[in-house]
Image (cartoon, rainbow, N blue to C red):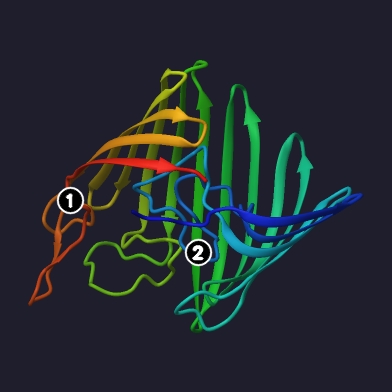
Amino acid sequence: IVGRLDRFFAQFQLGDVQWIIGKQVIATGVGQIFTAVSQVQRYMFDFIDPEFPKTEDAVSFIWSGPLQLEARFLPKVAEQKEQNFHIRVKGNKSNFDVALTSGRSDDKFYLGLESAGNIGDGLIRSELVGYQALEKKYLQGLLGFDYVFSPKWSGKLELFYNGFGRNQNYVFENFLHRTAPFRGQWYGALLLSWEIHPLLKAHWLSVVNLQDPSTLTHLYFNYSLSHNLDVLVGQFFNAGNEKSEFGGRLLVSPPNFELGAPNITYAAVRWYY
């Protein structure tokens, strides 16, 4: 049994000003599968819940004027040395939302640019973030596209560049940036969702290391027994050679370390309370 306090906050609003204190959804970043900026690692890439995003502890100040100004303080977590903060200024240009971001994430200063807008029946998202850490500079980039095929079918596609990763030749080490839990550099991902029945939904998520190449796929079904009780059944698949990220083993002896998640079948009951 695993429990998590996921939403607990107080919200105050006076005119165009809001204060939100507590565990809340953080708006910084446009990634749905990959995350370029966050205080801590969000849901692992092999479990994405598009209807119930994970939250983080924060104090948020939001001013909705001609431009939207957002300022957030995020307390440091285990293994972080300094407190985290986000600043975001968002406006609209030619029907595209554009935002400038800055702050400190996982003990690294960053400066970023986000955009999102509709193109036909789809939504295109992009993000570029530069980091300064340990006298080195790193770059994270993300491009995403969302499309609703029908009232029952929808999909998300993302391309991600992880500037903290390696071009293969992986070694067993802590991730340089925990919001990007990947060892490589170039990734693609596809998330498909199908409403089989108003109470039953199917999801297919594939994450591909484009340089190995290797892939990790997660197929799962979600059945709603009530408004706050779900049953989940799923299967993980991985594929790749022995030196790949998702299908191989790291050459460390003793012992050897698994890179990819194993092929497993699972069932779970999830209760929102």
Relative to 31, say whether 148 is above or below: above
Which amino acid, by three-letter code, is at mark 1?
Pro
Q: Quickly name the residue at label 2.
A: 139
Q: Residues within 10 Å of mark 2 (few under 14, many from 20)?
A: some
- Kindly indicate the quadrant of the structure image that contains residue 223: top left
Q: Amino acid at mark 2?
A: Leu
Vertical position of residue 197 compared to residue 64: above or below: above
Q: Which residue is mark 1?
A: 262
Q: Which numbered circle lies on residue 2?
A: none
Secondary structure found at label 1: loop
Rendered residue at 61%/52% (across/down): 25
Q: Nearer the viewer, residue 208 or 267?
A: 267
Q: Is residue 87 found left or right of 157 in the rendered image?
A: right
Q: Position of residue 181 (x, y in %)?
A: 37, 61
Measured as percent of width and height from the top left, residue 179 is found at 46, 62
Query: Which tag is nearer the camera, tag 1 or tag 2?
Result: 1
Residue at image location 45% in from the left, 41% down from the top: 49
Among the two numbered marks 1 and 2 on one chain, the one whose residue lies closer to the N terminus = 2
